[in-house]
Image (spheres, rainbow, N blue to C red):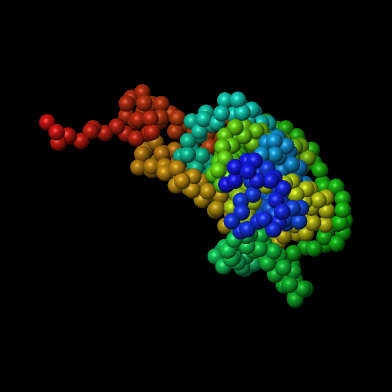
Amino acid sequence: MNEPGTRSQSLLSWTLTENTVVAPEERLTWPRTVTIGLQHVVAMFGATFLVPVLTGFPPSTTLFFSGIGTLLFLLITRNRLPSYLGSSFAIIAPVTAAVASDGASSALGGLVAVGALLVIIGLISHFAGVRWIETLMPPVVTGAIVALIGLNLAPVAKDNFVKDPVLATVVLVLLVASAVLFRGLLGRLAIFLSVVVGYVLALVLDWLDENNDFIDTSKIGDAAWIGLPDFQTPTFDLGVLPLFLPVVLVLVVENIGHVKSVAIMTGRDYDDSMGRALAADGLATMLAGSGGGSATTTYAENIGVMSATKVYSTAAYWVAGGAAILLGLSPKVGAVIAAIPDGVLGGVTTALYGLVGIIGVQIWVNNRVDFSKPINQFTAAIPLIIGIADYSWRVGDLVFAGISLGSVAALVIYHSMHAIGRWRGTLDIGGEPDRPEPPSSQP
């Protein structure tokens, strides 16, 4: 990595090679910057638009606020931290439940509450650091929470899959094949490519046989090319707020993971930006929830683009955010996205929701969580069953569903066992049962 000040911040295209690393404060020529920025848009597009489609929110509104949130993030992090804010999959389950029970406006209210809590956590972290977060949520806890959120969505994927199992199977096979057949950026766009191919296949099948009804394109022709997104206002219902509390924990984990990943790739210390990143994502989520968009989060897809291109210039993210805003200002684009067939969604979500669960497992693996220890076994096992089976508990008007109950269970089980074990001397600070030292061979 080039040290700051040793190279001009404005790089001419002819000075670049495939091994050139472009730092966050450095700038490429505009054609290259636009090209890289659009790559980020394509990388985030597949996952970002799927969230509003699956939750029933207007896709163009989510894209619009995704772009606004990205620009806000860059401003709050002082243009030092490259990142794109796309839709978080962690909100699908609570939003779906809230919409079914109280309507879309109450779900938006939940997202605003999530954003507000994330801002508070960001402010605390800015002044106190993030060590307290790591103490509150060790890897075994965060892994369990992320895993149960993904696995809790399995019935949703099944519901979409069975509506058109043949098309869903084709899309699922294409997704898996794309991830294996293609390298680099194309391999990372497996989700996007499988959705596009499935979409086109549905159109072709409808065209070949008028009796088929895979896709409804009636609203696409009526939609304008340019226009404001479909804004909605939130309402706040105390009864649905518990559904959204675990989402805050997931967004915290995702943002911290993103900052650490960028730090590793750039060779820089971004610890002082952790609080700003959390607060920025919180504000972006509040803004999105206030207008009808989905909760935002930093995106692994864009980490992939940075890794492949070695371009970390924040200018590319300004281009990406601006492009997302322009897409959001096209009702035609939103109508095309909203028309994605159920079978296509079923095939994609079968893989995606499972991958969310696997991310939780990856957290355990990366942090070498020892599952021979009872504290780790129970911290993971009980919340997973609660989340997958979708346990529920009603207290007056408050309803705690599987994700919230499982998340609380993970925190309570870990810290209770840890405290009792230390008090009784049966567990050490890492949660491992005390064992007698083996006899020494020395006299």
User: In this picture, is 440 found above or below 261?
Assistant: above
User: In this picture, is 387 found above or below 128?
Assistant: below
Q: Quadrant of residue 403?
A: top right
Q: Quadrant of residue 42?
A: bottom right
Q: Nearer the viewer, residue 302 or 177?
A: 302
Tell me if I can see residue 407 in this picture.
Answer: yes
Q: x, y (%) of residue 151? A: 54, 49
User: In this picture, is 276 found above or below 221?
Assistant: above
* Residue occupying image coordinates x 81% and y 43%: 231
Outermost residue on the bottom side: it is 208
Which quadrant of the rendered structure holds the C terminus? top left
Q: x, y (%) of residue 25? A: 68, 42
User: In this picture, is 393 found above or below 14?
Assistant: above
Outermost residue on the left side: it is 443
* Image label count: 0
Tell me if I can see residue 400 in this picture.
Answer: no
* Residue occupying image coordinates x 62% and y 34%: 273
* Residue occupying image coordinates x 36% and y 28%: 421
Seen in the image, is 142 located left or right of residue 118?
left
Q: x, y (%) of residue 143? A: 50, 42
Q: Quadrant of residue 279?
A: top right
* Residue occupying image coordinates x 62% and y 65%: 171
Q: Nearer the viewer, residue 220 or 275?
A: 275
Outermost residue on the top side: it is 423
Seen in the image, is 369 located left or right of residue 6?
left
Q: x, y (%) of residue 147? A: 52, 46
